[in-house]
Amino acid sequence: MSRKPFIAGNWKMNMTAASGKKLIEELKPLVKNANCDVALCVPAILIPEMVKAAKGSNIKIGAENIHWAPSGAFTGEISAEMLKEYGVEYAIIGHSERRQYFGETDETVNKRLHAALNAGITPIVCVGETLSERENGTTNEVLDRQLSVGLAGVEDIKKIVIAYEPVWAIGTGKTATDEQAQETIAHIRKKIGELFCPNCAQKVIIQYGGSMNAKNCKGLMAQPDIDGGLIGGASLKIDFATIVNFDK
Ligand code: PEP
């Protein structure tokens, strides 16, 4: 089953309009012959400028979050429709930093991803276990809960991208080994098969995220169930192009 790899960056709360534009200009020629889909998820305020900067290239722009309501009294939030209007094609949903610092739950992940789908934005749904969950052997149980609650009511699972991000590997420099990432992502694919259908699960793009960089990307990308990466720190640098060109 061939799935087109997908490499996405997550700038988090980094970059300015000027530094973001400069990086995109530098990346454009370096990633133009990529054999994968490419996106950069950027802070909301930078979206209009980054969409302009990426115009005419194969770099798509994504958001880092989305609110579930179409409009209303939600001070400080941004709706899917507002993001779509500015050319956003992807949105990260349920990143572990949002779960940890902003009270995101599997239920709010589910509401946000439906809002994204309704607006025609592809959700990149983040799942992953903490260090203590891995150490006490509950990784699969945690992932099963995140997937069954988080993805409830999805009609076409192929429209969702999953990012497996072990919390202990995000921003720590500690990457999951190729084998750990493969084994856990194979479990995620199996669970999606049970929740939806085995055949559809084979078509779902599942990324690995957690200290993925220009050095370790080849080994991770060589794993049969790993279809791409969600890249934090390394997406702020020209190294992002090396990851996008992992197969060259
Ligand atoms: C992330 O923020 O999704 C991430 C994987 O970060 P990093 O690559 O810096 O670990």
Image: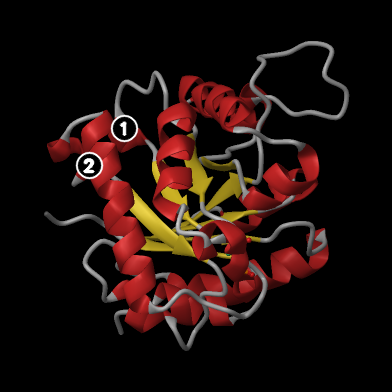
**Image position, residue 102 (x, y; %):** 78, 40
Residue located at (71% from left, 71% from top) = 22
Q: Quadrant of the N terminus?
A: bottom left
Q: Residues within 10 Å of mark 1 (few under 14, many from 20)?
A: many
| Pointer 2 residue | 201
Res. 230 visible in picture:
no
User: Which comes sooner in the sequence, label 1 or label 2?
Assistant: 1
Q: Residues within 10 Å of mark 2 (few under 14, many from 20)?
A: many
Q: Secondary structure under badge 1? A: helix
Q: Which mark is residue 78?
A: none
Residue located at (15% from left, 38% from top) = 198
* Residue in the foreground of this view, choosing between 6 and 151: 151
**Image position, residue 162 (x, y; %):** 42, 47
Q: Secondary structure under badge 2? A: helix
Res. 61 visible in picture:
yes
**Image position, residue 105 (x, y; %):** 64, 33
**Image position, residue 179 (x, y; %):** 32, 75
* Residue, far bottom: 215
Q: Which mark is residue 157?
A: 1
Q: Amino acid at mark 1?
A: Ile
**Snapshot quadrant of residue 172:** bottom right
